[in-house]
Image: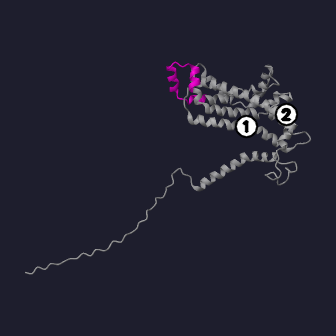
């Protein structure tokens, strides 16, 4: 027998190298990620709010820098002054004793800030950390005073100040704002946010109330103290109605009351009024620029130092 061997040849097809480009995964937008249209709408809204807030200030600054030859009552007034000058600020000082009025405002603001920082700190710490009878009643009375508007109590405040012999004095102007009930509640909230374990540990170590307040409470509420300083200064500096009621001597006028002399009976220069407004606004910017740094440091640190 003849054995026939069949040779089977397998033909292999040559492999062609196929280059595959890596496919980049698409970044899926999260559930809370706003769409581009919504983001643009938010920025437009923020820009509108910025113009409403900063616009009047910039317009007053532009008016204060305009020269006497420019017409501020034209139908199409120019925003940028054609002949910028700082002479209007010097004329304000020549028209009224602006620096004496500013010193009176500084004295009133200093008394209000000192009273709020000291008094509201002590009252807020007592309501938040100390246990005594009638604590809830006192807290309820503080909350009740916030319901009454200032116009309701202004007559009784004036009668009280006059009976104390403080009428027509800077102390009488600063006395009603020396301790604000809202600031007391803010300090109580700030002290209540401090962990109670810290006070308990200090109490075990033998610390008294004043030591716990100084070494544990105050380092943790510096941010709230900065907020109180800023808003108290703004309220005392910009107050117009109460100093106008209490003061009779023009030499004791605060700056906001003294600026009314720039608006004469028969003539009024809007450039001088705008310049006086800028002079009154500058200390607010300085105080806010100084205190806001401590505010953010107090919020970020939150540490107990002693």
Q: Name the image quarter holding residue 243.
A: top right
- The answer to which of 254 and 85 lies nearer the viewer is 85
- The answer to which of 12 and 306 lies nearer the viewer is 306
* Mark 1 surroundings: few (<14), some (14-19) or many (≥20) residues within 10 A: some
* Mark 2 surroundings: few (<14), some (14-19) or many (≥20) residues within 10 A: some
Q: Is residue 25 above or below residue 17?
A: above
Q: In which quarter of the image is the N terminus?
A: bottom left
> Which secondary structure is most common in the magenta stretch?
helix
Q: Residue furthest left?
A: 1
Q: Which contiguous range is marked in magenta?
A: 188-216
Colour approach in the figure: one colour
Secondary element at image label 2? loop
Q: What x and y, as percent, mark residue 27?
A: 49, 56
Q: What x and y, as percent, mark residue 274?
A: 81, 43
Q: Distance between the residues labelled 2 and 1?
A: 20 Å
User: Which residue is under mark 1?
Assistant: 284
Mark 2 or mark 1: which comes first in sequence? 2
Q: What x and y, as percent, mark residue 206?
A: 52, 18
User: Which residue is under mark 2?
Assistant: 97
Q: Quadrant of the C terminus?
A: top right
Q: Mark on residue 297?
A: none
- The answer to which of 151 and 294 lies nearer the viewer is 294
Q: Name the image quarter holding residue 106.
A: top right
Q: Residue furthest right?
A: 266
Q: Is residue 283 above or below residue 172?
A: below
The answer to whether the residues at label 2 and label 1 have Cβ atoms under 8 Å apart is: no
Q: What x and y, as percent, mark residue 245?
A: 82, 29
Secondary element at image label 1? helix
- Determine whether, in the image, residue 10 is placed left or right of residue 297: left
Tell me the residue at 88%/50% (across/down): 69
Tell me the residue at 41%/66% (across/down): 20
Residue mark closest to the camera, 2 vs 1: 2
């Amino acid at each position: 027998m003849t054995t026939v061997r069949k040779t089977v040849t397998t033909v292999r097809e040559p492999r062609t190298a196929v280059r595959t480009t890596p496919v980049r995964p698409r970044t899926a937008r999260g559930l809370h990620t706003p769409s581009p249209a919504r983001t643009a709408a938010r920025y437009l809204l923020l820009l509108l709010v910025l113009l409403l807030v900063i616009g009047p200030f910039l317009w007053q600054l532009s008016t204060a820098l305009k020269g006497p030859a420019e017409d501020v009552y034209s139908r199409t007034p120019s925003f940028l002054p054609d002949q910028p000058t700082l002479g209007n600020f010097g004329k304000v000082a020549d028209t009224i004793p602006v620096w004496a009025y500013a010193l009176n405002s500084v004295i009133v603001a200093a008394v209000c800030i000192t009273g709020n920082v000291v008094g509201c700190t002590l009252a807020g710490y007592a309501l938040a950390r100390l246990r005594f009878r009638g604590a809830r009643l006192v807290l309820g009375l503080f909350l009740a005073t916030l319901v009454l508007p200032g116009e309701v109590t202004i007559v009784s405040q004036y009668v009280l100040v006059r009976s104390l012999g403080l009428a027509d004095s800077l102390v009488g102007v600063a006395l009603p704002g020396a301790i604000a009930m809202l600031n007391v509640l803010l300090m109580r909230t700030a002290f209540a946010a401090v962990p109670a374990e810290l006070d308990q540990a200090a109490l075990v170590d033998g610390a008294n109330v004043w030591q716990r307040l100084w070494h544990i409470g105050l380092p943790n509420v510096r941010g709230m103290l900065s907020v109180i300083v800023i808003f108290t200064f703004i309220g005392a500096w910009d107050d117009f109605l109460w100093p106008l009621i209490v003061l009779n001597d023009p030499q004791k006028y605060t700056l906001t009351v003294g600026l009314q002399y720039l608006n004469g009976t028969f003539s009024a220069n809007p450039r001088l009024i705008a310049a006086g407004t800028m002079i009154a606004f500058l200390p607010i910017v300085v105080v806010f620029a100084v205190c806001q740094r401590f505010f953010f440091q107090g919020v970020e640190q939150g540490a107990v130092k002693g």
